[in-house]
């Protein structure tokens, strides 16, 4: 069983042609399949910010998918950072 101490937070800035191509929708679907909570948010500079919390293994799978070349659009770079989970996220939403 997963305890709050086992949960982490992934913050990933996704660069490339990732807006207007269904990227956030697919990210949400993949995150929900993995049991993660968080959001995928468009930014004015064309990047998408993905913030997700859950077990490290599931977050690593999501990060791998973001970098896989199997996403909608074209990802040129993913810059990630890791933190302790804050527990302030519910569900996974597109913003």
Image: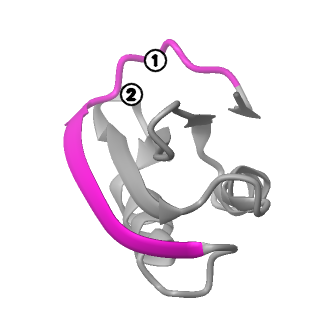
* Residue closest to the eye, 58 or 40: 40
Q: Is residue 32 magenta?
A: no
Residue ID for mark 2: 4
Using the image, determine if residue 65 lies above or below residue 46: below
* Residue closest to the eye, 57 or 38: 38
> At which x and y percent is residue 22?
79, 60
* Residue closest to the eye, 52 or 23: 23
User: In the figure, is residue 86 to the left or right of 21?
Assistant: left
Q: Quadrant of residue 3?
A: top left
Can residue 39 be seen here? no
Which segment did they paint magenta?
74-90
User: In the figure, is residue 28 to the left or right of 44?
Assistant: right
Is label 1 in a helix, a strand or a loop?
loop
User: In the figure, is residue 29 to the left or right of 85?
Assistant: right
Residue extending furthest top? 88
Name the residue at 32% across, 39% down.
Answer: 8
The reply to whether dot 2 and dot 1 touch (C-beta < 8 Å) is: yes
Of badges 2 and 1, the one in the foreground is 1
Can residue 7 be seen here? yes
Q: Which mark is residue 27?
A: none
Residue ID for mark 1: 87
> At which x and y percent is residue 39?
61, 34
Using the image, determine if residue 28 lies above or below residue 75: above
In space, the residues marked 2 and 1 are separated at their CA atoms by 8 Å
> At which x and y percent is residue 32?
73, 52
Q: Which mark is first along the chain, 1 or 2?
A: 2
Q: Quadrant of the C terminus?
A: top right
Name the residue at 36% across, 17% down.
Answer: 86
Query: What is the chief secondary structure element of the magenta stretch?
Result: strand
């Amino acid at each position: 069983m997963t305890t709050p101490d086992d949960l982490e937070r992934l913050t990933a800035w996704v660069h490339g042609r990732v807006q207007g191509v269904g990227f956030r929708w697919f990210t949400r679907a993949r995150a929900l399949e993995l049991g993660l909570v968080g959001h995928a948010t468009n930014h004015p500079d064309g990047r998408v910010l993905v913030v997700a919390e859950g077990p490290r293994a599931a977050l690593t799978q999501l990060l791998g998918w973001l970098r896989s070349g199997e996403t909608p659009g074209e990802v040129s770079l993913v810059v990630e950072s890791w933190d302790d989970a804050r527990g302030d996220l519910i569900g996974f939403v597109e913003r």
